[in-house]
C-alpha cells in the first residue's frame, strides 16, 4: 500500500504523480489572472467599506511571502552546499504560496477601493499576480520532485525566477509609496555608476533670490505642493486622478473637477480639503502624512486669491505683511539657500518653465515638455481646431526653437505659420493634415534635417512641393493621401529615399 504525502515529507518519499494538484494549481492561476478583467477598473467611492477595510491590510501581509520565500531560498541553497541538509520542506513552500495569494488578494482590494492609478500601479498589480502564479508553480514543482523523486533542478530554476519577479513587484510597490528613487536617492556615486544612474550632484551654497524676484508659483507654491501633496498626486500615484507635480496638471484638476478656482481660494477644492478637521476622512493630506503648515496654507490661499498666475513674480504683487512674514517663515523652515548645483540643461528647462506657463492660457493643455529632464517641447493644437489661426500660432514664437513634435491637424494655420518653423531645427514630427498649406511650406520643411515624420493628408501640396522633401536625410514616414501628388513624384521620392515609408491611403 502506497504512503500518502504529507507537507513535511522529505524529498525521498515517492507516490503517484500529483495530477490533481496540477489541475487545482492551474485553476487558481486562471482565477488570479482573470480577477482584474472580471472586476474591471476601480471605481473610487462606489466600493463597499469592507473592500477598503480589507485592502488596508495589504501593507501588513505583503511582507510574509517576501520573508518566507527568502527563507526557502536560503534553505535550498544550504541544501545544495550541504548534502546532509534536505533543503526547504513542502510546508514552508506551501506557507509561502498561501501568503503570496492572500497578499495579492488584499492588494487587489486596496486597488479596487480607489486612490491608486497610473502605469506604475498597474505594473505593480500585475507583478504581484505573476508572483503569486509563479509561487503556485513552484509549489507544484516542489511536490512533484518530492512525490516522484525527480530532479530538483526545474524547481530551483522556478524558485529563482519567482524571487526575481518578487523583487521587481516589491520595488514597484516601494516606488508607489516612497517615490521611484527612494532606494537609490542616497546611493554613493560609484554604486550609482554600476547601476547605470546619473551621478549625484553635491549641494552647494548659493545666494537666494530676493523675495521680489521670485516667481510665486515656481519658487514658492510648487515647492509647498512638492512637500505636502505630490507624494499622493503624481504620475505613479494620482489619487482622485489629480496630479499636482506641474501647474498645468494642478489646473486641469481630477475626478472631482477643478483643484483651483483662480481668484476664489475658499471655493478651491485643495483649500477646502486642507481646512477640514484633521480627523475628517476627506482631510488632505491624509492621516499619516505631514499636514500643511498654517503659514504654507496662508501663502497658497493668497496666491489663488490673486488669480493663480503661474508667471507672476512677488514684485508684481502687493503682498500683505502676513504673507511676507509667512514667506520668511518658509525660508526658516526649509533653508532655500542650500540648493543642488544646476546643470546648464536644467537651467534651460527652468527658464522655459515660465514661458510655457505663460502660454498655457492661450493653449490650454497643448504645450508640454517631452520629459521632466528635457528642454524639448511638444505641441498639439487639435483641441483648438479652426480657432488656431496664424495670429494665434505666432504666440509660440519664443519657444519654437525647442519644438520636437507638432500636431496642427485641422487647424487654420497656413504657409505663414509654417515659415516660423524655420527656427525649429530639432523638429522630428509634424502633422499638417487638413490645413491650408501649399507647396510654399515645403521650402521651410525641406531645411529641417531632423524631420522623421511629415503628414500632408488633405492638403494642397503637389509634386513640385513634395519633391523638395528629398533633401531630408532622416525622413522615415510621409502621409500624402488625398493630395495632388502623383505616382511619378512618389516613385521619385522612393528612389531618392529608399528607406522612406510613404502612406498613400486607400
Image (spheres, rainbow, N blue to C red):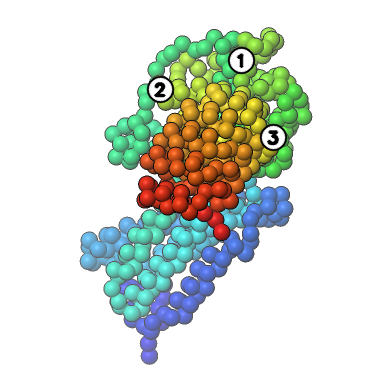
Q: Which residue is mark 3?
A: 387
Instruction: Indicate the quadrant where residue 262 lies.
Output: top right
The tag earlier along the polypeptide, 2 or 1, is 1
| Marks 2/1: CA–CA distance | 23 Å
In the image shown, does 260 or 449 lie closer to the viewer? 449
* As drawn, 320 above or below 340: above
Q: Which residue is mark 2?
A: 344
Q: Residues within 10 Å of mark 1 (few under 14, many from 20)?
A: some
Q: Nearer the viewer, mark 3 or mark 1?
A: 3
Instruction: Indicate the quadrant where residue 218 lies.
Output: top right
| Marks 2/3: CA–CA distance | 37 Å
Position of the C terminus, as image quadrant, is: bottom right
Q: Residue at x 45, y 43 (%)?
A: 467
In the image shown, does 414 or 410 lie closer to the viewer? 414
Could you tell me if residue 332 is visible in this image? yes
Q: Residue at x 34, y 75 (%)?
A: 146
Name the element at disc 2: helix
* As drawn, 83 above or below 429: below
Q: Which mark is residue 313?
A: 1
Amino acid at each position: 500500500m502506497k504512503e500518502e504525502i504529507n507537507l513535511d515529507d522529505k524529498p525521498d518519499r515517492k507516490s503517484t504523480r500529483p495530477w490533481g494538484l496540477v489541475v487545482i494549481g492551474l485553476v487558481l492561476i486562471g482565477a488570479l489572472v482573470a480577477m482584474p478583467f472580471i472586476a474591471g477598473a476601480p471605481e473610487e467611492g462606489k466600493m463597499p467599506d469592507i473592500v477598503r477595510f480589507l485592502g488596508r491590510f495589504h501593507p501588513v501581509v505583503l511582507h510574509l511571502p517576501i520573508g518566507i520565500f527568502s527563507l526557502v531560498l536560503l534553505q535550498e541553497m544550504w541544501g545544495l552546499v550541504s548534502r546532509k541538509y534536505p533543503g526547504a520542506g513542502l510546508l514552508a513552500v506551501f506557507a509561502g504560496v498561501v501568503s503570496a495569494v492572500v497578499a495579492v488578494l488584499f492588494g487587489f482590494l486596496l486597488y479596487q477601493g480607489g486612490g491608486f492609478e497610473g502605469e506604475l500601479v498597474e505594473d505593480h498589480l500585475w507583478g504581484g499576480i505573476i508572483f503569486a502564479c509563479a509561487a503556485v508553480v513552484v509549489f507544484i514543482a516542489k511536490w512533484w520532485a518530492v512525490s516522484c523523486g525527480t530532479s530538483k533542478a526545474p524547481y530551483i530554476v522556478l524558485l529563482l525566477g519567482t524571487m526575481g519577479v518578487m523583487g521587481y513587484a516589491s520595488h514597484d510597490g516601494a516606488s508607489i509609496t516612497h517615490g521611484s528613487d527612494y532606494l537609490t536617492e542616497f546611493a554613493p556615486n560609484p554604486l550609482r555608476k554600476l547601476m547605470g544612474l546619473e551621478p549625484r550632484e553635491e549641494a552647494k551654497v548659493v545666494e537666494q533670490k530676493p523675495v521680489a524676484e521670485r516667481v510665486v508659483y515656481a519658487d514658492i507654491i510648487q515647492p509647498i505642493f512638492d512637500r505636502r501633496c505630490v507624494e499622493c498626486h503624481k504620475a505613479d500615484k494620482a489619487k482622485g486622478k489629480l496630479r499636482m507635480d506641474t501647474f498645468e496638471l494642478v489646473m486641469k484638476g481630477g475626478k472631482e473637477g477643478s483643484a483651483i478656482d483662480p481668484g476664489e481660494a475658499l471655493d478651491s477644492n485643495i483649500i477646502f480639503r486642507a481646512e477640514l478637521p484633521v480627523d475628517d476622512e476627506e482631510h488632505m493630506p491624509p492621516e499619516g502624512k505631514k499636514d500643511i503648515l498654517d503659514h504654507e496654507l496662508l501663502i497658497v490661499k493668497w496666491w489663488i486669491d490673486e488669480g493663480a498666475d503661474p508667471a507672476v513674480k512677488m514684485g508684481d504683487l502687493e503682498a500683505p505683511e502676513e504673507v511676507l512674514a509667512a514667506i520668511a517663515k518658509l525660508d526658516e523652515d526649509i533653508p532655500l539657500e542650500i540648493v543642488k548645483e544646476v546643470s546648464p540643461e536644467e537651467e534651460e528647462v527652468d527658464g522655459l518653465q515660465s514661458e510655457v506657463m505663460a502660454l498655457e492660457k492661450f493653449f490650454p493643455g497643448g504645450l508640454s515638455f517631452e520629459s521632466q529632464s528635457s528642454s524639448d517641447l511638444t505641441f498639439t493644437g487639435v483641441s483648438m481646431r479652426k480657432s488656431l489661426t496664424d495670429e494665434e500660432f505666432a504666440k509660440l514664437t519664443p519657444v519654437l526653437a525647442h519644438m520636437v513634435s507638432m500636431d496642427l491637424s485641422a487647424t487654420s494655420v497656413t504657409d505663414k505659420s509654417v515659415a516660423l518653423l524655420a527656427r525649429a531645427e530639432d523638429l522630428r514630427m509634424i502633422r499638417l493634415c487638413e490645413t491650408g498649406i501649399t507647396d510654399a511650406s515645403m521650402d521651410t520643411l525641406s531645411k529641417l534635417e531632423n524631420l522623421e515624420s511629415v503628414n500632408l493628408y488633405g492638403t494642397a501640396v503637389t509634386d513640385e512641393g513634395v519633391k523638395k522633401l528629398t533633401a531630408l536625410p532622416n525622413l522615415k514616414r510621409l502621409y500624402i493621401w488625398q493630395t495632388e501628388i502623383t505616382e511619378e513624384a512618389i516613385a521619385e521620392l522612393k528612389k531618392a529615399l529608399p528607406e522612406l515609408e510613404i502612406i498613400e491611403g486607400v
